[in-house]
Image: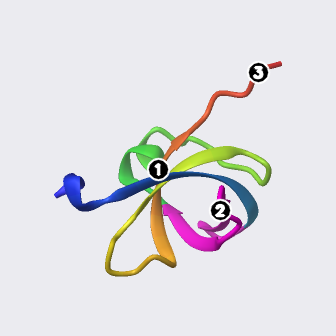
Amino acid sequence: MSEDKLEVEGTVVESSKGIFRVKLENDHIVIGHLSGKMKMYKIRVLPGDTVTIELSPYDLKRGRIVRREKVEH
């Protein structure tokens, strides 16, 4: 199943009640929600974070956030 997904990097622009607006590298804005593993381990995603989002080839405006990149201090 996961072979059909498109993985794209982006930056979180806005968040509200578990729904995130993510600006992709190609300047498109998509809506994303957290994957089950990220909810289970209570990984927080804040505006400004770089994330990896999986998009379905059928609907390129919605996706699932699967990874938050580590922040370098």
How far apart are labels 2 and 1 at the CA level?
Answer: 27 Å
What residue would you read off at disc 3? 72
* Residue range of the region highlighted in magenta in the rendering: 15-33
Secondary structure found at label 3: loop
Evaluate if marks 1 and 3 touch, with contact meaning CB atoms under 8 Å apart: no
Q: Residue at x 64, y 27 (%)?
A: 70
Q: Residue at x 51, y 78 (%)?
A: 61
- Indicate whether residue 28 is drawn in magenta: yes
Q: Position of residue 56 (x, y in %)?
A: 34, 70
Evaluate if marks 2 and 3 touch, with contact meaning CB atoms under 8 Å apart: no
What residue would you read off at disc 1? 39
Q: Position of residue 60 (x, y in %)?
A: 45, 76
**Is 2 displayed left or right of 9 in the figure?**
left
Q: Residue at x 37, y 53 (%)?
A: 36
Disc 1 or 3, which lies upstream in sequence? 1
What residue would you read off at disc 2? 26
Please identify, in this view, whether the residue under mark 1 or under mark 3 is nearer the observer: 3
Question: Considering depth in this image, is 41 or 60 the residue closer to the camera?
Answer: 60
Give the residue type that dot 1 points to: Lys
How far apart are labels 1 and 3 at the CA level?
Answer: 23 Å
Secondary structure found at label 2: loop
**Is 46 displayed left or right of 31 in the figure?**
right
Secondary structure found at label 1: helix
Disc 2 or 3, which lies upstream in sequence? 2
- Indicate whether residue 9 is drawn in magenta: no
Q: What residue occupies the far top of the structure in this picture? A: 73
Relative to 16, is 47 above or below?
A: above
Per the picture, the main secondary structure of the magenta-coloured stretch is strand
Give the residue type that dot 2 points to: Asn
Where, by quadrant of the figure, is residue 72 drawn?
top right
